[in-house]
Amino acid sequence: MSLLQWLDYAAVFVFAVTGALAASRAQLDIVGFLFLGCLTAVGGGTLRDMILGRDQVFWVADPGMILSACLAAVLVFFTAHLLESRLRALEWFDAMALSVAVPAGVGVALGMGQDWPIVLIMGVATGTFGGLMRDVVANEVPLILKQGQLYATAALAGAGVAVLADTAGGPQWVALLSCAAVTFALRAGSMAFGWCLPVYKSRPPRR
Amino acid sequence: MSLLQWLDYAAVFVFAVTGALAASRAQLDIVGFLFLGCLTAVGGGTLRDMILGRDQVFWVADPGMILSACLAAVLVFFTAHLLESRLRALEWFDAMALSVAVPAGVGVALGMGQDWPIVLIMGVATGTFGGLMRDVVANEVPLILKQGQLYATAALAGAGVAVLADTAGGPQWVALLSCAAVTFALRAGSMAFGWCLPVYKSRPPRR
Amino acid sequence: MSLLQWLDYAAVFVFAVTGALAASRAQLDIVGFLFLGCLTAVGGGTLRDMILGRDQVFWVADPGMILSACLAAVLVFFTAHLLESRLRALEWFDAMALSVAVPAGVGVALGMGQDWPIVLIMGVATGTFGGLMRDVVANEVPLILKQGQLYATAALAGAGVAVLADTAGGPQWVALLSCAAVTFALRAGSMAFGWCLPVYKSRPPRR
């Protein structure tokens, strides 16, 4: 199994955990866990594959992806009550999933020889859209919109590092692993230490 | 016209009715009825066709689908005030639409020779995404997220029966009609008699 | 550069402005502006290209589109505080973006020789989906759902004029520019003078 496939598997499994945690917060039944788990797990990668026009969406080519997402959802169904805060767990698993999904998007776009703006977008989109769909469907405020946190920024910085490393000409696994490391470091630092960029503050009240 | 085309037509028409009912609840004008009607009508099948990489999305290949959705929207525009409860009507029409859209998704995936996990997903996705888009756009809580109801479960059970019937080797129409019957029976039973699966209940309060 | 490419560029730039204004209302950081700007800018056209099965999504074929959306987002980040009402500005820029995106959708569908119902749908979908995604993600009530305003109606009327002009056999630029003019006139008239179609009013209270 190539590094790229491994990243896809990891993203699918960990995103499915976050989708199932969202289902537990909405008090759904087991099929609701499977539904939100799979939607979150494959949402970003499906969009990537449809936009890039790949021959097959990755999980249609490899149904094992779906089974792995279902496994994650079932595990969460039987263990989520052990967590002290499911929201906190959801956010940390989401950070991990983001950190493997961004390089999964970047790697596919690089492998198809896309220009760097497309590679950046594919990294960010693959990393963020699964979680965005989860939050929109579960009626929660999207994590990506939380003020004063690095989220899209972490994804964009990770994708940027991968593009630089690829341009520098090193082996692909260096680019992809640096991407994962930078994304996770920024996102985790933001959650743990409050790292953020200055946000837009309007002078007049919101109108 | 094949059974599969007939199922697509029925799903389009009945889902358009539910979209138009949602438009009536949001007090839109006639074009708003057409918009929400068409979005709901073709949403699930469009996703199915894009994911499976069919040559053409079903309603681009047959624009009669769009006209049939528009007809449904116009009918609702002029008759919805006769209903005692538009929400109740929306839910029952949605149950009918689900029951024809799931076999429509399953049938296409089986016809392309997909593996059974893909067939199940395509059944559930074709059945549920139109209604999900309708509810997200109309700012209502998605029906699929209502606690203590069978919705995704009904779709998954119906798709599962179709996969079993197909594996058993009977003719396709038996598989598709059993799928529709099982889906409708479970969904309707849930609405009428409160059938449900146990939902996830956290011990600590929602955090 | 053809008229059609020019329309795509204009739609991308102006929709990106509206996405960035939505980001300013949600008090996001600069990457949040880029994210919502790009999502709004390319959302409608991406859906159009995926549904019509074009060889490449328009902004994958021309990454300059993405850079132009990013430029718009950065401009708004540094100037939005100068606006008296960002909501009012968002609505007027959205009207302009709608008026160039509808002919951009219609032009592509006509160029592929699609039937008129498909051309109408592609015009409306290209014009409205970017803004719809912006509003759903930013948790605002979609502009297209505001009661007593012409929005989908303006898009549909503009697309209808283009189909008529094309059937009449004039040059394509006449059809596309009339489409833009009609769409903008109806939408602007609705915002400035309250033009609207009768909305559905239920006799019994909303149930």
Image (spheres, coloured by chain):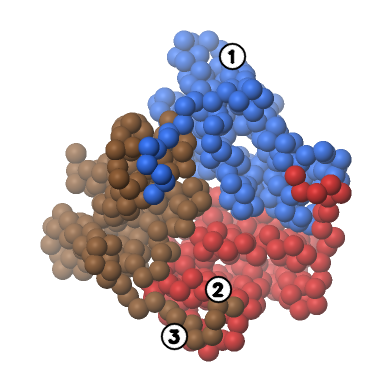
Chain colours: A red, B brown, C blue
- Residue under numbered circle 3: A78
Measured in 3D between alpha carbons, the distance from the residue under mark 3 to the one under mark 1, in whole angstroms, is 63 Å
Residue C142 image offset from top left, x and y in percent: 58, 44
Name the front one of labels 2 and 1: 2
Q: Secondary structure at mark 3?
A: helix
Say what amino acid the circle numbered 2 marks.
Answer: Thr
Say what amino acid the circle numbered 3 marks.
Answer: Phe
Judged left or right of residue B68, residue A135 is right
Judged left or right of residue A64, residue A16 is right
Say what amino acid the circle numbered 1 marks.
Answer: Val
- Residue under numbered circle 1: C174
The crowd level at tag 1 (other Cα within 10 Å; few <14, some 14-19, many 20+) is some
> Looking at the image, is C30 positioned above or below residue A174?
above
> Looking at the image, is C23 positioned above or below residue B83?
below
The crowd level at tag 2 (other Cα within 10 Å; few <14, some 14-19, many 20+) is many
Task: Say which quarter of the image contains residue B82.
Answer: top left
Q: Are marks 2 and 1 in contact (CB under 8 Å)?
A: no
Q: Which of the two discs, 3 and 2, labels the residue nearer the N terminus?
A: 2
Taking the spot 46% from the left edge, 10% from the top edge, the residue there is C168
Q: Secondary structure at mark 1?
A: helix
Measured in 3D between alpha carbons, the distance from the residue under mark 3 to the one under mark 2, in whole angstroms, is 14 Å
Which residue is at the front of the view, B165 or A105? B165
Taking the spot 73% from the left edge, 71% from the top edge, the residue there is A187
Q: Chain of mark 3?
A: A
- Residue under numbered circle 2: A18
Q: Secondary structure at mark 2?
A: helix
Task: Say which quarter of the image contains residue A74.
Answer: bottom left
Residue C9 image offset from top left, x and y in percent: 69, 33
Taking the spot 33% from the left edge, 42% from the top edge, the residue there is B17
Can residue C144 be spotted in the picture?
Answer: no
